[in-house]
Image (cartoon, rainbow, N blue to C red):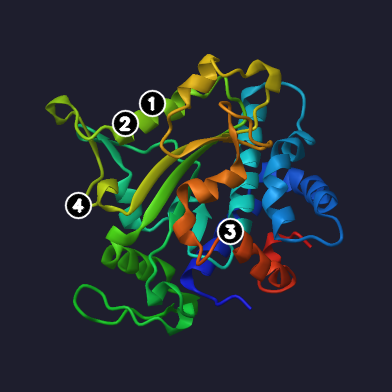
Amino acid sequence: MIEPTIIEHIRELSIESCFELSAFQTGWSSWKSSINQILGLTYNENDILNISDHLSDIFLSTRGSGRTQASLSGAGYGWEGLICWYLNLCFAGTRGVAIRKNSLLPEPLRNSISVNYGNFKSNTESDIIVVVFPDHEEFKINKDHLTINDKTGKQIPVLNGNKFNYRKLIDRMTEIHFDSFNIGIIQCKTNWNDNAQIPMLWSMIYETESFSNNAISIGMNGYSINDMTNFSYSFVTVPTNGLSNYKQNSTSVNRVRNLTGGNYWGYPSKSSIASSLKEIFNNNFRDAFSNNVRQSLKRIIPDLRSDLNYFNLI
């Protein structure tokens, strides 16, 4: 049984947001069938982790013809949803959660990744943000038993009417423990050639400690990514172009070679080109797991029919 923590509450809301995407809804029945064929009737933690090696083929199995702006945009949302679904499946029962809906992100974290050009606030292309919550008791207990005080020392009620008081609780909890967070921005794109320069430029902005004349600044309201335990920027692509187009010295490959969080795709890892998405857990988010991702997955397999049935895998 998985403890109904505030982290698990966010995870369920994030998965629900994936199923709200029309592109995800359209593809899911076919994707689910493909995933179940890959897993087979009896599967273990390694089989679930290795779904990442097939994500691109799963996604492309429902690709429509044409490259209209509407079709490209819809495909992008579908890929984003599939990546968010997979990441959260592997994070289930841990302190890590993948969030694709910006409104679910705690406000202090939104402030920390704000890019400000003079007085103009610009948000990064953050399709998914992985948050590894601190190893503190309030993030590990039943959310209905939380006792969190606001800035005045008054306890924040767990319920607002008949609904869980998510926003006030998570914002205050994040404010208190901000310096213990690890977050990773993940940009998801179906096309590598057309989009590689975007994560390259955003990653460069986040890596730069200062800009001339303070024209660009990172963070606001006193929150900065520099105060966290770790920050990373990653790229996850299908890609829709043939794999033979990508060589070690290809421009698109070089553009994302030095991203702080790495470059990934939905295929097995290929040296000097891209890593399978499953490698992101060891590379960027090891602190989400009490031991490792495989042991974590082994524990949650029985819960896929009960507490985690919202993944709609079984």
Q: Nearer the viewer, mark 3 or mark 2?
A: 3
- The residue indicated by pointer 1 is 201
Residues 52 and 223: in front is: 52
- Assess whether mark 3 and mark 4 are in contact (beta carbons under 8 angstroms): no
Label 1, secondary structure: give it: helix
Q: CA distance from mark 3 to mark 1?
A: 31 Å
Q: Nearer the viewer, mark 4 or mark 2?
A: 2
Asked whether residue 308 appears in the rendered view, the answer is no
Q: Amino acid at mark 1?
A: Leu
Q: CA distance from mark 2 to mark 1?
A: 6 Å
Label 3, secondary structure: give it: helix
Disc 1 packing (10 Å; few <14; some 14–19; many ≥20): some
The mark nearer the N terminus, 4 or 2, is 2
Residue 95: x and y in percent read 48, 64
* For residue 169, above or below residue 208: below
Q: Nearer the viewer, mark 4 or mark 3?
A: 3
Q: Is residue 111 left or right of residue 165?
A: left
Residues 211 and 30: in front is: 211
Residue 160: x and y in percent read 42, 77
Q: Amino acid at mark 3?
A: Val
Please tell me which residue is depicted at 55% across the width and 20% down the height of the picture.
194
- The residue indicated by pointer 4 is 222
- Assess whether mark 1 and mark 2 are in contact (beta carbons under 8 angstroms): yes
Q: CA distance from mark 4 to mark 3?
A: 33 Å
Residue 170: x and y in percent read 38, 67
- The residue indicated by pointer 2 is 205
The mark nearer the N terminus, 3 or 1, is 1
Q: CA distance from mark 3 to mark 2?
A: 31 Å
- The residue indicated by pointer 3 is 293
Residue 168: x and y in percent read 35, 69
Label 4, secondary structure: give it: loop
The mark nearer the N terminus, 4 or 3, is 4
